[in-house]
């Protein structure tokens, strides 16, 4: 018996990862307000870089940003939290 392979496992993986990342960023926003400004800016920059890499990788693999919910998604800036 052969197993049917998922035709687009990378798309499902990217969707799952994107959803988890966005959820993590949202949960982290509460923590950012308790950190020093320097720590919060560092975390914001790290998340922004991960989102940039995710968008670039999706584009390289022909995965539409709309499929990942990333068309207009940006990590909130620290000044947006104040």
Image: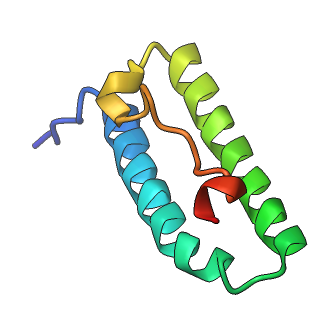
* Residue shown at 33% from the left, 24% from the top: 66
Q: Nearer the viewer, residue 38 or 24?
A: 38
In the image, farthest residue toward the bottom:
34
Task: Measuring from the top left, give residue 54's x and y in whole percent.
Answer: 58, 36
Q: Is residue 4 left or right of residue 34?
A: left
Circle count: 0
Residue at point 54%, 79% (across, down) = 30
Q: Residue furthest left?
A: 1
**Left or right of 8 on screen, residue 39:** right
Q: Residue 9: where, in percent of width, then height?
A: 33, 37
Residue drawn at 31 percent across, 40 percent down: 12
Q: Is residue 2 left or right of residue 49?
A: left
Foreground residue among 11 and 6 = 11
* Residue in view at x 42 percent, y 25 percent: 71
Out of 65 and 60, give the one closest to the viewer: 65
Vertical relation: 9 (above or below) 67: below
- 1 shown above or below 30: above
x and y percent of residue 17 in the render? 44, 51
When asked about the image quadrant of residue 53, the answer is: top right
Tell me how the rendering is colored: rainbow
């Amino acid at each position: 018996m052969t197993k049917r392979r998922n035709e687009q496992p990378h798309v499902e993986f990217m969707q799952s990862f994107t959803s988890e990342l966005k959820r993590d960023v949202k949960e982290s926003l509460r923590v950012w307000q308790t950190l020093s400004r320097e720590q919060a800016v560092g975390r914001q920059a790290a998340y922004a870089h991960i989102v940039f890499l995710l968008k670039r990788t999706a584009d390289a693999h022909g995965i539409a940003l709309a499929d990942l919910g990333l068309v207009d998604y940006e990590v909130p800036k620290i000044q947006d939290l104040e």
